[in-house]
Image (cartoon, rainbow, N blue to C red):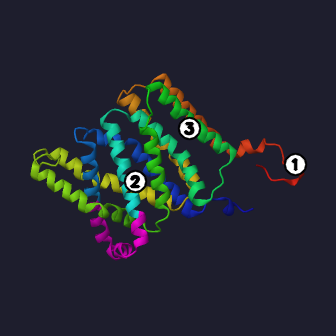
Amino acid sequence: MSDQSENQHPDESLGIFYAGVAYAVWGIVPLYWRMLRDVNPFELTVQRVFWCALFIAGVTAIRGHTGRVAVIFRSWHLLSILMLTSLLISANWTLFIYCVATNQLVDASLGYYMTPLVSFAMGVAFFGERLSRVRMVAIGLAAAAVILQAISIGHFPWIGPALALSFGLYGTFRKFAPVAALDGLLVETLLLFPLTAGLLAFWVVKGTGAFTLHTPFRDILLIGGGPITAVPLAMFAAGARRIRLTTLGFLQYLSPSVTLALAVFAFHEPFTRASALSFAFVWTALLIVALEGRIARFRPAPADGQPPG
């Protein structure tokens, strides 16, 4: 076999680069949102969607791609998918900002560690990918981590699973929309633009909104939420369309690792024994999935020509 055939396909390599940069940025972005922790998480999400739409609309106009976006709006099939993904990512944004504001980034990082395991399940459900016994064990360990957290805190730890499910579903359904990354993100935010613009106008009239023109630094941060949201998400979408869900799952380890380090060492959030055990379960699950190929080598050969189970 030639060296060229052993190398990754250039498009897949580019996808890995895009997704990797996106996850690195997402890992440190709590530092940015922490400067806006006095803003209600729901309102901050509304601000993000609003300024994100304006930012991408400007970029799209400069690039001369408005015609491509118009084509998307003429397809009910694409619009229905992008409406669903816009709701999923908005819910994910709101919950993550809530975690930043309430010092629950440890739980958020656990949720994003679970996302690759959700991606495996999504691959089986929507793309017919085979779920091996090793991956079933891994998913079982993730479930055990949630149960352990529930026993420790006395109620269902909804933050981690909700973040994992919302982002896992976003990545899955985004693959069903064969549109360019920025074009799709623009449509996602424009579909919610009437709602976000109306809410912001209402808050300005009532004098209860975060964008007041009396706090220039906070106003600049709110506007900056547009590009800081759009750029990594567009890179993620571009990467997700180029690589397999399983590969995408492994890249997701970068973001929660950085976020966990920030939560514990920079924001001094508590990291209890129960938290350590829960993370140990999830890390073990991810490790055995990473070593799945080597584990398979130690399986006994199937008898009588029967395929392995």
Name the residue beneath numbered marker 3.
142
Say if 71 sits above or below 297 in the image.
Answer: below
Residue assigned mark 1: 303
Left or right: 67 as drawn, with respect to 6: left
Residue 69 within the magenta-colored segment of the rendering: yes
How many numbered markers are drawn? 3
Q: Gap in Å between the C-alphas at discs 2 and 1?
A: 46 Å
Viewed as shown, does residue 301 lie left or right of 155? right
- Front-most of residues 292 and 141: 141
Task: Write the start and end of the magenta stretch as one range.
Answer: 53-81
Q: Residues within 10 Å of mark 2 (few under 14, many from 20)?
A: many
Residue contact at pointers 2 and 3, CB within 8 angstroms: no
Give the residue type that dot 2 points to. Leu
Q: Which residue is mark 2?
A: 88
* Residue 127 visible in the shown view: yes
Helix, strand or loop at label 1? It is: helix
Amino acid at pointer 1 = Ala
- List x then y, in percent, for residue 187: 34, 65
Give the amino acid at mark 3: Ala
Question: Which residue corresponds to the image point at 27% horizontal and 46% vertical from the top-left?
Answer: 42
Q: Quadrant of residue 62?
A: bottom left
Q: Residue at x 10, y 45 (%)?
A: 214
Can see residue 290?
no
**Element at label 3:** helix
